Amino acid sequence: MSEADHLSDALVGMLSRRHNGWFTPVVVAIEGLTPQQAAAIPAKGFNCIWGVINHMSYWQEFMLHKLRGEPVNSMRLEGKRNWQKIKNPGDEQAWKTDCENLFAINKELAGLVAGYSDAELDEPAAPGKPRRCQVIQGIVAHNSYHTNEIISIRHMLGLWLEQV
């Protein structure tokens, strides 16, 4: 497996592949949540699961644009997803759409990554910036961090499924 394939596989596997060998992916961590549960904040100073999902989407889309060399309008992205207040915590369709958006952006990002050569992975993502492989590893780490946050919030809310 090439390094690009390995990184692409890690992006998707650790987020949306139910049986990836060892890591509880987001798709399992959010399974069975109602929009009200996903919007619940367990205590002052904490995030809600829905907000975490939107934050993860924001940063994956942001980095997708950066890796493509495209300018990023962070105000447009931020107004759309990054730590925004959940407007209607009872909206089942909005919760489902935001979750689907996370997985779609992740898949698109993984597709881009899979197309890189080893030489391209070793190049800076932009002049004076970290190498592409480092940026991609950072996204995997960011997703992993927030997956744990989702699991912790579920525990705090008493919503974790013991059979997982």
Image (cartoon, grey):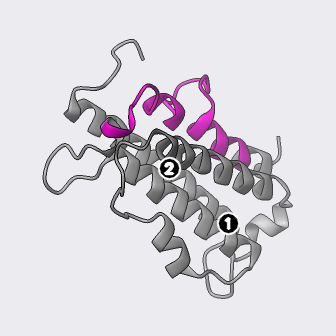
Label number found at residue 143: 2
Identify the residue shown where x is 46% and y is 27%: 31
- Report, in whole angstroms, how far the alpha carbon at label 1 lies from the one at label 2: 14 Å
Q: Quadrant of the N terminus?
A: top right
Give the farthest residue toward the left.
44
Place of residue 161 in the rendered image (x, y in percent of width and height, measured from the top left): 35, 19
Quadrant position of residue 151: top left
Q: Residue at x 61, y 64 (%)?
A: 61
Please tell me which of labels 1 and 2 falls first in the chain. 1
Up-down relation of residue 35 to residue 163 (above or below): below
Could you tell me which residue is drawn at 56 percent across and 46 percent down?
A: 97
Query: How many numbered marks are there?
Result: 2
SS assignment at label 1: helix
Please rate how many residues cluster around mark 2, counting C-alpha atoms within 10 Å: few if below 14, some from 14 to 19, many from 20: many
Q: Residue at x 63, y 87 (%)?
A: 128
Q: Is residue 3 left or right of residue 98?
A: right
The residue closer to the viewer here, 158 or 94, is 94
- Residue 151 seen from this side: yes
- Specify whether 104 is left or right of 37: right
Three-letter amino acid code of the residue under disc 2: Asn
Judge left or right: residue 152 versus residue 148. left
Query: What percent of the width, then of the height, locates residue 18?
Result: 59, 25
Q: Is residue 122 magenta?
A: no
Residue 158 x/y as whole percent: 22, 26
Does 15 appear in magenta?
Answer: yes
The magenta stretch is 8-36
Above or below for 6 versus 129: above
Q: Amino acid at mark 1?
A: Leu
Which mark identifies residue 64? 1
Q: Does residue 155 sit above or below 83 in this rendering?
A: above
